[in-house]
């Protein structure tokens, strides 16, 4: 499968900066907002600017997901996903409580057919082995509390479950959140701080390293010429476009480094009105594909509810790749830097009923009375992946990468001096849950040099 390796465009020449900021965050999704909020509160005397290319924050992956606060069941011991999901879950519940963001800790059942019970038991043992990876708590309880229950016990909790379900894993810490209210709250926190500002409708078009930082050119939708800013600390949290700045710069190193490909996975959601889910009180997940380890690629087509009690199913998994027009030579990786080629994924956001029957087939393995007629296309989300299908055993961890401008200006590609650029890549699920923990390590560990 072909990935996308495009960088920034080449239509803008180097320019001198017009002003400077202490922290420049690129990308106004939930992670960029969390990072900017943390920095603006930690360093009130410094300037923190967040720039977002859309006219509103959270227009991409952050607003097209299941809105689940994940407990941290699936991710390998020692991975950033495990650490940051567990820490982020605690931070998320605390933040929602303190800032009146709507949420609900519902719990979740992962349900197994008879041939899947070994997976459930293995997953339960994995959860019992996880510990809090920080010094912020003295809690000696398991970081991810789970309970193995029988199929009959699961049906007492959710009567519409299939009689074929023989065992379930009950996660008590899983919940749901109003992600839009959460992002609105973070944005308000930034703009109400002394040095914070959110700039919308503005995209990065060029980045140049200097001996002590970064010169960033930003083009606003209403202006023919870019604004030019100098920053000592550049944080790239641009989600689906997180590879572009690096891919603009890596070929300029001595020796040049290869560009980083990114792959996109499309997930469709369906709303549901009909029988088979009467009075459902918890999230219900099937056992993931055991050939992918701990559900590294997809958690399966699961049931979630929103804060109004509406039921939806999804996401499924469908890989999409750049069209031939996104490759300058017409083949190979997508290396065209034209906006319409780089954003080819946006053409896949229109919901359709093409996969509804396939989703229904998956759903009825654990909720047999759900009807095909009750399922309707709802919305589509895109998840950034750092390897193609089947790569790295299906698991991709979050990437928190640091580069120093001195790597380019010194010419030896090694120097840890100058300004720092932090690139956050592969931030898919559990990115929403982990967002505040990602912000915490950016501010308290990476920028602090720990």
Image: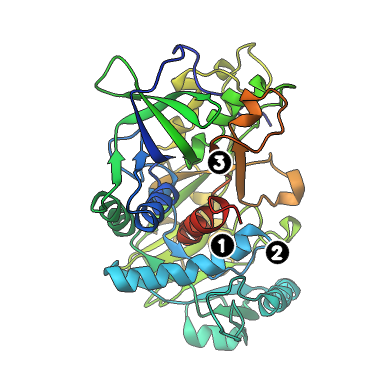
Location of residue 333 in the rendering, given as x and y in whole percent from the top left corner: 66, 23
Residue plotted at (61% across, 35% down): 262
Position of residue 394 in the picture relative to residue 50 (left or right): right
Residue plotted at (31% across, 72% down): 98
Residue that numbered label 2 is attached to: 78
Residue that numbered label 3 is attached to: 423
N-terminal-most mark, 1 or 3 = 1
N-terminal-most mark, 2 or 3 = 2
Residue that numbered label 1 is attached to: 84
Residue 277: which disc? Answer: none
For the residues marked 1 and 2, what is the alpha-carbon distance in whole angstroms?
A: 10 Å
Quarter-of-image position of residue 384: top right
- Which quadrant of the figure contains the C terminus? bottom right
- Which quadrant of the figure contains the N terminus? top right
Front position among marks 1 and 3: 3
Quarter-of-image position of residue 49: top left
Location of residue 210 in the rendering, given as x and y in whole percent from the top left corner: 53, 25
User: Dot 3, how many residues are within 10 Å of its Cα: few (below 14), some (14-19), or many (20+)?
Assistant: many
Contact? badges 1 and 3 (CB < 8 Å): no
User: 43 or 305, which is in the foreground?
Assistant: 43
Residue 310 shows up from this direction? yes
Q: Is residue 158 above or below residue 188?
A: below
Location of residue 209 in the rendering, given as x and y in whole percent from the top left corner: 54, 26
Please, what secondary structure does the residue beneath circle 1 have?
helix
Please, what secondary structure does the residue beneath circle 2 have?
loop
For the residues marked 1 and 3, what is the alpha-carbon distance in whole angstroms?
A: 16 Å
Q: Is residue 8 above or below residue 31?
A: above
Position of residue 272 in the picture relative to residue 415 (left or right): left
Residue plotted at (44% across, 58% down): 66
Q: Is residue 391 above or below residue 179?
A: above
């Amino acid at each position: 499968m072909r990935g996308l390796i495009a960088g920034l465009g080449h239509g803008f020449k180097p320019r001198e900066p017009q002003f400077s900021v202490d922290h420049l965050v690129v990308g106004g999704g939930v992670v960029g907002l969390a990072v900017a909020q943390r920095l603006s509160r930690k360093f009130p005397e410094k300037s923190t600017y967040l720039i977002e290319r859309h006219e509103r924050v959270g227009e991409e992956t952050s607003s097209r997901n299941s809105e689940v606060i994940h407990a941290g069941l699936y991710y390998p011991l020692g991975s950033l996903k495990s650490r940051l999901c567990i820490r982020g879950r605690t931070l998320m519940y605390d933040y929602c409580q303190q800032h009146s963001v709507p949420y609900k800790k519902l719990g979740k059942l992962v349900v197994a057919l008879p041939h899947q019970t070994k997976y459930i038991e293995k997953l339960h043992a994995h959860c019992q082995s996880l510990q809090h990876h920080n010094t912020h708590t003295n809690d000696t309880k398991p970081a991810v509390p789970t309970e193995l229950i029988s199929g009959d016990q699961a049906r007492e909790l959710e009567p519409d479950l299939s009689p074929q379900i023989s065992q379930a894993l009950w996660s008590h810490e899983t919940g749901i959140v109003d992600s839009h209210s959460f992002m609105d709250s973070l944005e308000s926190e930034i703009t109400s701080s002394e040095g914070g500002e959110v700039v919308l409708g503005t995209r990065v078009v060029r980045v140049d390293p200097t001996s002590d930082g970064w010169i960033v050119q930003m083009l606003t939708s209403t202006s023919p010429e870019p604004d030019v800013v100098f920053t000592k600390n550049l944080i790239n949290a641009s989600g689906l476009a997180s590879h572009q700045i690096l891919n603009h710069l890596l070929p300029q190193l001595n020796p040049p480094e290869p560009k980083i490909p990114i792959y996109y996975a499309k997930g469709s959601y369906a709303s549901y009105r009909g029988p088979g889910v009467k009075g459902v009180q918890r999230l219900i997940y099937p056992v993931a594909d055991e050939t992918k380890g701990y559900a590294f690629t997809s958690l399966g087509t699961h049931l979630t509810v929103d804060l109004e009690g509406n039921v939806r199913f999804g996401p499924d998994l469908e890989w999409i790749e750049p069209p031939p027009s996104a490759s300058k030579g017409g083949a190979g990786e997508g290396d065209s830097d034209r906006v319409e080629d780089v954003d080819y994924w946006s053409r896949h956001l229109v919901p359709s009923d093409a996969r509804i029957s396939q989703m229904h087939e998956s759903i009825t393995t654990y909720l047999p009375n759900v009807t095909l007629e009750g399922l309707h296309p709802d919305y589509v989300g895109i998840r950034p992946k750092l390897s193609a299908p089947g790569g790295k055993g299906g698991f991709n961890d979050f990437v928190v990468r640091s580069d120093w401008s001195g790597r380019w200006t010194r010419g030896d590609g090694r120097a840890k001096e100058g300004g720092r650029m932090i690139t956050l890549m592969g931030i898919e699920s559990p990115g929403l849950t982990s967002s505040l923990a990602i912000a915490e390590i950016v501010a308290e560990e990476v920028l602090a040099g720990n």
